[in-house]
Structure formats: C-alpha cells, structure tokens
Amino acid sequence: MKESDKQAQALKLDLVEFCATRGDAGKWLNEKLNQVFDERTFFLAFGMAPKKFDRESVVWSEALKTRLREVNPDFEKVVWTLDELARLAMLLHLPANGNVATIEKLVGSADRRELVLVYKSMPFLLNAEAFKWLYADGIRTNMVDVFDSIVLHNSFASEYLDEAAWNQMVLKAIFMERPIFKIYKLDARKNDSLALILHDFVKERWAAGRLVSPELWRMIDGFASGEMLESARKETESGTDVAKIAAAKVLLGAGMGESFSKALAQTAEKTSWDSIGEQVLALQEA
C-alpha cells in the first residue's frame, strides 16, 4: 500500500472514530460505511447525514486535527460541522477507481451547502488530482459561499491548478472583492503573467472611474516595471489610505522609495500584506 493510500485510510478511520462518539448518529454512519457502498447507498446516506448529525461546529480531537493538517494546513480556518465530517467520511469511503463519476453527479445536483462541503473536501480525496477540471470549473460560480470554499483556505488550488487556472482564480477573487490574503500559499504562486493580467485590470477599472482592491498590488509586487511602476506611483498619490500603503510596498520592492514621502515609506515597511488584506476586509464589512 502506497503512503498516500495509508494516509487516506488512516484519515477515514479517524473520521469514523470521531463521528462514532456522536451516539446513535455515529452508529448509523458506521453501519452505512460497512454496507456495500455503491453509488446508490452513497447518495442515500449523503442526503440523510444532516438529519442524523447536528450542524454544530466541530470540537476537534488532536488526532483528527493532525491528520487533516497533513493535507490542508488551513483547514481549521473555515467552519466545519458534524454532518459535514460525516459526509467527508462518505466521500473518502467511495472507491477511488470510481469516485470521479459519482462526485461529478453529486456536484451536478447538489445544493449550495453540499457544494461548499464537496469543494472544501477535495484536497482530502485520495485521487484529488483527478478533480482538477471539476475544481477549476467550480471557480466560475457566482455564489460567494461556494466560491469561498473553493478559493479560501483550500490547499487544492496551490497543489493542483496550473498557472493559467490559478491566475484566473486570483483575478476572479479580486473582481468579486474576496479577501485574497486567505488564499493558501498565495505568494508562492505569484508570477509575471498574473502581474500583467492584474495591471490590465487596474487600467480598465481606472478608465471606468472605479477603484481597485489594494490587495491586488500584492500580486504585482516583485514583478513591477515600466508602466506598472508608474501606476503604483499614481496610486500613492490618489488612492485610499490603505491603497497608498500597498502601492508604496510595490515601489519599495522595486527600489523606488524616493518617489513618495518618507512617512509613507516608513508605514509601508512596517505593514505586512496580510495586514493590508485585513484592513481591506474590515472596510468592506464596516
């Protein structure tokens, strides 16, 4: 048995053991998983899970947290409920040689809450890479809660999406005004093509008399030259307070700290990109 197979099997067993502490609901889940777990059984059990398990937030055991962190270190940064854990156990119990077709059908008929669960569960599937196209297709959704489950605190994108799909995901997250500082390994996937795409987006927004998210400059930082630097300099003069700081960080990274005030330079130097993201989110939610 391959190491990845062992990890998936161990995670499934830990999930079932954890759910088993929920009394009759845990007993029901164990019985279902020990039946012939064909597609029909899966769909029936998946639909019944919320009636058997409460929708309360999970109080994690250390063993289960360790298993889940091995795959997605950010998993705790989103809410998981008991019925979702039971459904995750079911997804893991599907045979890997046939689960693609079954999960495709599930996504095709799922409600919003079920879609959220499926997308945030994808990193934990043994054959996760086989779902790249389904994951990328999901990025097209305009349902914010579903989009967030795909993009935020989900290790799948960083692990499996190619550059073009990754760039499209980040662009859409910015367009939808989602907090990109919550994207797992955001900085590790920065690239020149994305910087160019986002700078074009900046020009389009400005031409329409609209602002851009200050978080956008994070993706340009380290790749800026020529017109991008001129746009960043413009932002330090006419942008919002937080946008000025973000643009100043881009200019500082390019060695152009002399092009704006010393006070702004000092503020930019001590302000992290995550802090800028948190400020933007706070302003959006105010």
Image (tube, grey):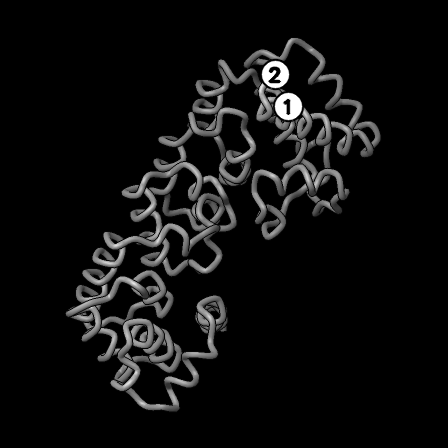
* Residue at 47 percent of width and 79 percent of height: 270
Picture mark count: 2
Asked whether 231 or 189 is in front, the reply is 189
Relative to 226, 132 lies left or right = right
Q: Which residue is mark 2?
A: 1
Looking at the rendering, which quadrant does residue 211 occupy? bottom left
Task: Rate crowding at label 2 as few (under 14), some (14 to 19) or many (20 or more) other CA atoms within 10 Å.
Answer: few
Asked whether 219 or 44 is in front, the reply is 219
Q: Which residue is mark 1?
A: 6
Q: Which x, y percent locates residue 257? A: 30, 82
Q: Are marks 1 and 2 in contact (CB under 8 Å)?
A: yes
Q: Dot 2 lies on which element?
A: loop
Residue 60's tag is: none
The type of residue carrying mark 1 is Lys
* Residue at 49 percent of width and 43 percent of height: 155
Looking at the rendering, which quadrant does residue 94 occupy? top right
Quadrant of the frame with the N terminus: top right
Task: Rate crowding at label 1 as few (under 14), some (14 to 19) or many (20 or more) other CA atoms within 10 Å.
Answer: few
